[in-house]
């Protein structure tokens, strides 16, 4: 069964637990399913199913996905835990998205931060925000986490060897054979996220974004 390399451990774990074999598909720099790798691995593996995880609320191009699914005769099973209530090519307003927008606007002001591009068709529902530092190095990333934590902002970094705060990189999934995913590893090594509750006001979200930017500016990357 094909599934995202960017997901939480229970997703491929469910496949392995029932005697299946999870084949991990790379993600692109916007942390969505890489369609070129999906096509390659669908053909190579002969898989009949795709367990699609909309990890952290990032939706891939669903029309293109279903086109590929039909081409390779894949049955698509969606894990929508992070996208309950989301829309595609529709409209919806929700409180989490408004908070996401406030933090994202602050982070967009830094030329050291890369925000994932989200499709105009996507009506996301998300309780966390993700961003990347394109050339940080391990020491720089750890320094960012430490500095923001000292000011009360808890960031998760996906580059850690072991899961921290639901980061869950594939290298720690010891219930399955190791797989080579250089593109996903490169994205993970630069990827951060932060969960924020609905109790945060817009002012709180703005302050969080400002703190992240200020501390990144102080770190030698």
Image (cartoon, rainbow, N blue to C red):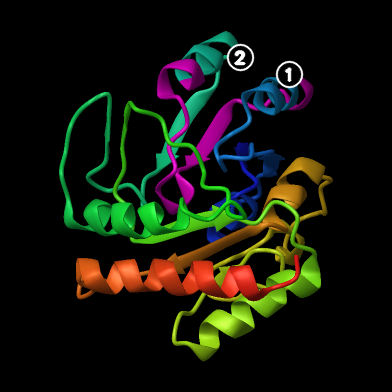
Q: Which residues are magenta?
A: 43-65
- Which residue has dot 2 on it? 72
Q: What residue appears at the point 18 percent right and 32 percent down from the top-left corner?
A: 91
Instruction: Kindly identify which numbered label has been placed on residue 97.
Output: none
Is 18 above or below relative to 149? above
Q: Position of residue 28 (x, y in %)?
A: 64, 36
Count of numbered tags: 2
Is residue 75 highlighted in magenta?
no
For label 1, count other residues whose C-alpha is less than 10 Å away and answer few (under 14), some (14-19) or many (20+).
few
Q: Secondary structure at mark 1?
A: helix
Residue 174 in view here: no
Residue 54 in view here: yes
For the residue pair 91 and 98, the one nearer the viewer reads as 98
Q: Residue furthest top?
A: 71
Q: Residue furthest bottom?
A: 150
Quadrant housing residue 45: top right
Q: Secondary structure at mark 2?
A: loop
Is residue 54 highlighted in magenta?
yes
Q: Position of residue 188 (x, y in %)?
A: 68, 55
Q: What residue appears at the point 64 percent right and 75 percent down from the top-left corner?
A: 218
Q: What residue appears at the point 37 percent right and 52 percent down from the top-left corner?
A: 105
Q: Position of residue 177 (x, y in %)?
A: 81, 54
Query: What is the spatial separation of the Cα atoms under label 1 and label 2, in whole angstroms?
Result: 7 Å
Quadrant housing residue 163: bottom right
For the residue pair 1 and 105, the one nearer the viewer reads as 105
Q: Earlier in the sequence, mark 1 or mark 2?
A: 1
Is 13 above or below relative to 120? below
Kindly indicate whether the residue at mark 2 contacts the one at mark 1 (C-beta within 8 angstroms).
yes
- Which residue has dot 1 on it? 43
**Left-right relation of 10 to 162:** left
């Amino acid at each position: 069964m094909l599934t995202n390399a960017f997901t939480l451990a229970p997703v491929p774990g469910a496949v392995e637990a029932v005697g299946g074999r999870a084949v991990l598909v790379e993600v692109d720099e916007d942390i969505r399913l890489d369609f070129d790798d999906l096509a390659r691995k669908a053909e190579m593996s002969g898989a009949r199913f795709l367990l699609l995880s909309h990890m952290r609320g990032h939706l891939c191009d669903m029309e293109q996905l279903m086109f590929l699914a039909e081409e390779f005769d894949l049955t698509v099973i969606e894990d929508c835990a992070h996208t309950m209530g989301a829309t595609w090519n529709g409209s919806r307003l929700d409180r989490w998205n408004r908070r996401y927008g406030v933090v994202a606007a602050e982070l967009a002001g830094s030329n050291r931060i890369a925000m994932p591009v989200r499709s105009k068709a996507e009506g996301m529902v998300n309780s966390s925000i993700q961003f990347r530092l394109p050339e940080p190095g391990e020491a720089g990333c750890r320094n960012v986490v430490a500095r923001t934590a000292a000011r009360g902002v808890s960031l998760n970094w996906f580059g850690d060897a072991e899961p921290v705060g639901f980061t869950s990189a594939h290298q720690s999934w010891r219930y399955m054979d190791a797989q080579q995913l250089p593109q996903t590893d490169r994205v993970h090594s630069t990827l951060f996220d932060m969960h924020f509750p609905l109790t945060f006001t817009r002012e709180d979200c703005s302050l969080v974004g400002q703190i992240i930017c200020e501390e990144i500016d102080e770190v030698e990357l």
